[in-house]
Image (spheres, grey):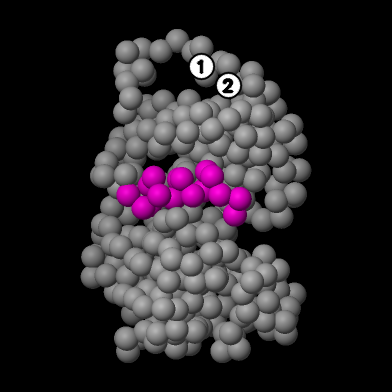
């Protein structure tokens, strides 16, 4: 299933970011006949992956010999597709570096999940600012790189208001281990991807603090309600949050040991300071990057997000058990008690 060639005349791609997801996607496209170049800002990474054909965070995957690694951002020149796979906090700077070499004929994708702290923009909104004129597609869903790297069945959402662009990107995954779906609700898809990381932190914190499955189920369910409330208030489609980019991505991120947000939350719940927890995880923890922007959006749109506020309190040093007790006993209106 994972080795069919892509049935398209467009067959070249640049992936900006040599993390686990960028590298797993590079392999997925390369073994199916695409010309793939991966950019990293780190010369050490480029040399290591070029020589060893291994990624330390993807130990079961061999990097195909036909993937090129480079530190030269002009690698995007002439490529049919450009994927931004850098952490959300670097999307703008990476796009600014790439902008002189990107043309409107190229389809741009982002797999980063986040909200820019200063502007409260999503990833595609940032890219539209920096790369005006390009078709820009958000890819999101329950897609742990560790499983895609081993060709395990996976689903993803290709989101763009231009449905022709969303459909074109969807077709890139035909014949691979990934089944792709399309969605025109880009804002809903991107908010889901960013905010589920905050709820995954909460889920991990609960486990680290010694709470059980009842608590975790409550956090995931009520966390989804918060995400949906905010999204609908911002004009998103309610059904988006019941789909793969919503509940699907939330469940996998809040429960899987592949999830860096879940792992980081567990450490924080055990009393490890957030900065130290990130060091122990050894990768970017997007939930911490999204936390303040999520609360800023909630305030801007007049939406209550008690689970996200609880995460903020624990990250800032309060006891997880103390915060949980406060959540359970807080005064509520009739609307707060509704199961929705």
The location of residue 210, given as percent across then percent down, is 66, 29
* Dot 2 alpha-carbon crowd within 10 angstroms: few under 14, some 14 to 19, many 20 or more: some
> Is 4 displayed left or right of 117 in the figure?
left
**Quadrant of the rendered image containing residue 168:** bottom left
Q: Residue at x 28, y 58 (%)?
A: 183
Which residue corresponds to the image point at 34% horizontal and 33% vertical from the top-left? 229
Please give the label number shown on residue 324.
2
Residue 276: image tag: none
Residue 36 in view (yes/no): yes
Contact (CB < 8 A) between labels 1 and 2? yes
Residue under circle 1? 328
Q: Which residues are magenta?
A: 243-258
Q: Quadrant of the C terminus?
A: top left
> Which residue corresponds to the image point at 32% horizontal and 54% vertical from the top-left?
186
Task: Measure the C-alpha gap from mark 1 to mark 2.
Answer: 6 Å
Disc 2 element: helix
Q: Main secondary structure of the magenta part?
A: helix
127 or 220: nearer the eye? 220
Q: Quadrant of residue 334?
A: top left
Residue 121: give x, y in percent of width and height. Answer: 43, 49
Residue 297: x and y in percent read 43, 36
Q: Is 253 inside the magenta-drawn segment? A: yes
Residue at horizontal 41%, vertical 78%? 1
In this rendering, the answer to whether 149 lies above or below 8 is: above
SS type, badge 1: helix
User: Badge 1: how crowded within 10 Å, few (<14), some, or many (20+)?
Assistant: few
Left/right of residue 313 with respect to residue 84 in the rendered view: right
């Amino acid at each position: 299933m994972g080795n069919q060639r892509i049935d398209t005349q467009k067959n070249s791609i640049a992936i900006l970011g040599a993390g686990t997801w960028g590298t797993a996607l590079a392999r997925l496209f390369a073994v199916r006949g695409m010309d793939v170049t991966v950019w990293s800002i780190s010369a050490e990474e480029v040399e290591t992956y070029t020589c060893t054909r291994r990624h330390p965070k993807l130990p079961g995957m061999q990097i195909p010999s036909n993937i090129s690694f480079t530190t030269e951002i002009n690698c995007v020149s002439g490529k049919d597709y450009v994927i931004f796979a850098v952490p959300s906090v670097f999307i703008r700077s990476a796009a600014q570096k790439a902008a002189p070499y990107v043309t409107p004929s190229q389809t741009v994708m982002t797999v980063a999940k986040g909200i820019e702290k200063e502007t409260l923009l999503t990833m595609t909104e940032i890219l539209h600012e920096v790369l005006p004129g390009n078709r820009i597609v958000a890819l999101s869903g329950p897609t742990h790189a560790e499983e895609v790297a081993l060709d395990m069945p996976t689903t993803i959402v290709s989101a763009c208001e231009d449905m022709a662009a969303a459909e074109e990107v969807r077709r890139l995954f035909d014949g691979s281990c990934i089944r792709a779906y399309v969605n025109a609700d880009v804002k809903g898809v991107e908010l889901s991807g960013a905010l589920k990381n905050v709820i995954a932190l909460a889920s991990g914190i609960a486990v680290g603090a010694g709470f059980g499955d009842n608590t975790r189920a409550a956090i995931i369910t009520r966390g989804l309600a918060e995400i949906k409330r905010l999204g609908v208030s911002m004009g998103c489609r309610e059904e988006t949050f019941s789909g793969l980019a919503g509940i699907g991505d939330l469940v996998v991120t809040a429960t899987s040991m592949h999830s860096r947000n879940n792992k980081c939350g567990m450490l924080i719940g055990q009393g490890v300071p957030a900065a130290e927890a990130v060091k122990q995880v050894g990768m970017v923890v997007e939930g911490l990057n999204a936390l303040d922007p999520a609360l800023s959006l909630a305030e801007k749109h007049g939406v209550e997000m008690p689970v996200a506020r609880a995460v903020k309190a624990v990250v800032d040093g309060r006891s997880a058990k103390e915060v949980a007790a406060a959540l359970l006993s807080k005064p509520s209106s009739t609307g707060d008690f509704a199961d929705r």
